[in-house]
Image (cartoon, rainbow, N blue to C red):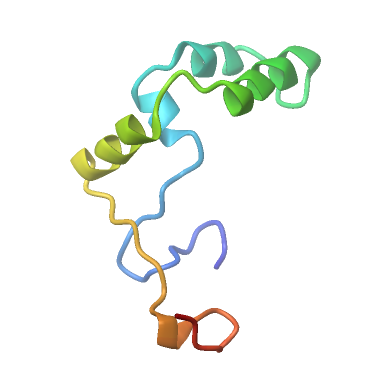
Amino acid sequence: MTDNQPSIPGYLDYQRREYCRDIQCPLQLQLEQCSPGSEPYERIRAECVRACRHTTYQFHHWLIQKGYLVVRKSCAAAVDGTRRL
């Protein structure tokens, strides 16, 4: 998969931080004011990783509302070709 090719043909992949941008997360808005890799950017990003202000429940329901599907390969088609239970 490349950056411009979806992992499933005919579908769009979730783009990193799309949820954060859409809900206008205050930390995301601060990140957008910083240069990637700068000290302020990395400090804010670390806060996102360590103490996100939103729950998995909120994110999951946002995905559903936006029409995203959460998919995985079947056991028979595991990435390494082995069958998993």
Q: Is residue 6 above or below residue 14?
A: below
Q: Quadrant of residue 20?
A: top left
Q: Locate residue 3, reporting x and y percent.
A: 55, 57
Q: Quadrant of residue 36?
A: top right
Which residue occupies 65% across, 23% down?
45
In terms of depth relative to the viewer, which is nearer, 25 or 53?
53
Q: Locate residue 22, reporting x and y percent.
A: 35, 26
Q: Is residue 72 above or below residue 23?
A: below
Q: Locate residue 67, reporting x and y percent.
A: 21, 48
Q: Is residue 10 above or below residue 14?
A: below
Q: Quadrant of residue 81?
A: bottom right
Q: Residue furthest right?
A: 39
Which residue occupies 60% across, 83% down?
80
In terms of depth relative to the viewer, which is nearer, 3 or 74?
74
Q: Locate residue 49, reporting x and y percent.
A: 61, 28
Which residue occupies 57% across, 11% down?
30
